[in-house]
Amino acid sequence: MFGFTTISIDAKGRLAIPAKYRDKLLFQNEDSIVVTRDPQYPALKIYPGSIWNSISSELQSLQGLDPIVRNLQWTILGNASESSFDPKGRMLILLPLELREYAEIKKAEKVSFIGMGNKFEVWNHQNWEMRQTGGALSTEILEVVLPESLKKISF
Amino acid sequence: MFGFTTISIDAKGRLAIPAKYRDKLLFQNEDSIVVTRDPQYPALKIYPGSIWNSISSELQSLQGLDPIVRNLQWTILGNASESSFDPKGRMLILLPLELREYAEIKKAEKVSFIGMGNKFEVWNHQNWEMRQTGGALSTEILEVVLPESLKKISF
DNA sequence: ACAGAATCCGGCTTATAGATCAACTCACCT
DNA sequence: AGGTGAGTTGATCTATAAGCCGGATTCTGT
């Protein structure tokens, strides 16, 4: 599941998964998807349920008194929002206000929906183009020295 | 059980577990809930009974001569407050005054209720937003070199 | 020991946010 | 051109958060 689609957020802040991915997700028997923050950039991550389960349990198992670990747990676990396919097989996800603000996404606006294999990213359209052309984003990138324990997790 | 919800403490200092988590807790046959201090930040931890049992027994089993260990035992074990919840209704938990003060939570005020997988955190709403945006909290963060014995416990 | 006060705890009600359902329009393909 | 499927928008309905209220229990001070 790769590639790039431009879709729009509707007036209520909802996002519809592009049909080409919907079919594959259903084929893989995914019954839910999870939206959360990207820990480094002003963007959102979308994980199919099974992928989310493995990532979240790895994250949880890390010892929780290290400030860096706790920050990642808060950012990723604490901002997660789970949605499921509706009975008709369509998928409209309500992006919570806080996530929209984080990704600088306004209602009734275009966003970039990017397939990254087993996960997706959602970017404000201008930010995505800026990133593509190497421009600077308004939001700072979190630069930290990651503990070894985190390096094996593929967020 | 992930994500956060903004809920309000009622005029009597009670907190209602958000409905989306209630079903899952019941499904896991949890019959009690434990609230205690977060050892590092001005926040509260909420553990389902079974999770609390394993964490508290691990903590108890540690040697009691290391000052850091003793501190953690005091903070976490000594401030624990157990509530049994009745399956019907709203699963209201009374937050003891001392814990509310520690987390800077006043009656009839908004708090952030954050699902971190098998446990929850409760934050004063402003503090949580401050943390999310990288601002400084009024309360100092406890930064210590942890003994190996603690690293395997995921508080 | 008693009365008064404060705290605790469950039920009931209502406004609202979120989920569900339905319809429309546009683009592309035949 | 007509038809089909996808993206998008709108409308309705349900579930839930939160305020209110009354009763039960505990605490306190006299």
Image: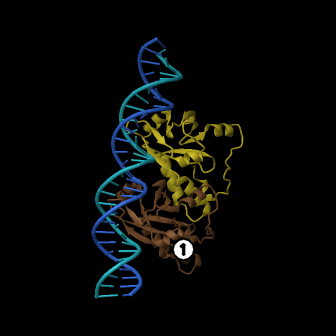
Chain colours: A yellow, B brown, C cyan, D blue
Give above or below for C27 relative to B26: above
Q: Which residue is painted at 49% across and 65% down in the image?
A: B45
Q: Could you tell whether A78 is left or right of B144 in the image?
A: left
Residue A91 at least partly seen: yes
Q: Secondary structure at mark 1?
A: helix
Q: Could you tell whether C5 is left or right of B132 in the image?
A: left
Residue B145 x %, y %: 63, 70
Residue A124 x %, y %: 61, 40
Residue B61 x %, y %: 48, 76
Q: Which residue is painted at 41% across and 70% down in the image?
A: B82
Give above or below for C26 relative to A99: above
Q: Which residue is painted at 59% across and 53% down in the image?
A: A152
Task: Decide: few, some or many residues near mark 1? Use Cα within 10 Å; few <14, some 14-19, many ≥20.
Answer: some
Of residues C23 and A125, the one nearer the viewer is C23
Q: Chain of mark 1?
A: B
Of residues C8 and B22, the one nearer the viewer is C8
| Residue designated by label 1 | B72
Q: Could you tell whether C6 is left or right of B155 in the image?
A: left
Residue A106 x %, y %: 57, 41
Q: Could you tell whether A130 is left or right of B33 in the image?
A: right
Exactly how many numbered labels are in the figure? Answer: 1
Give above or below for A149 relative to A105: below
Q: Which residue is painted at 52% across and 62% down in the image?
A: B123
Of residues B154 and A14, the one nearer the viewer is A14
Residue B155 at least partly seen: no
Task: Give the amino acid type for the residue marked by disc 1 in the picture.
Answer: Leu
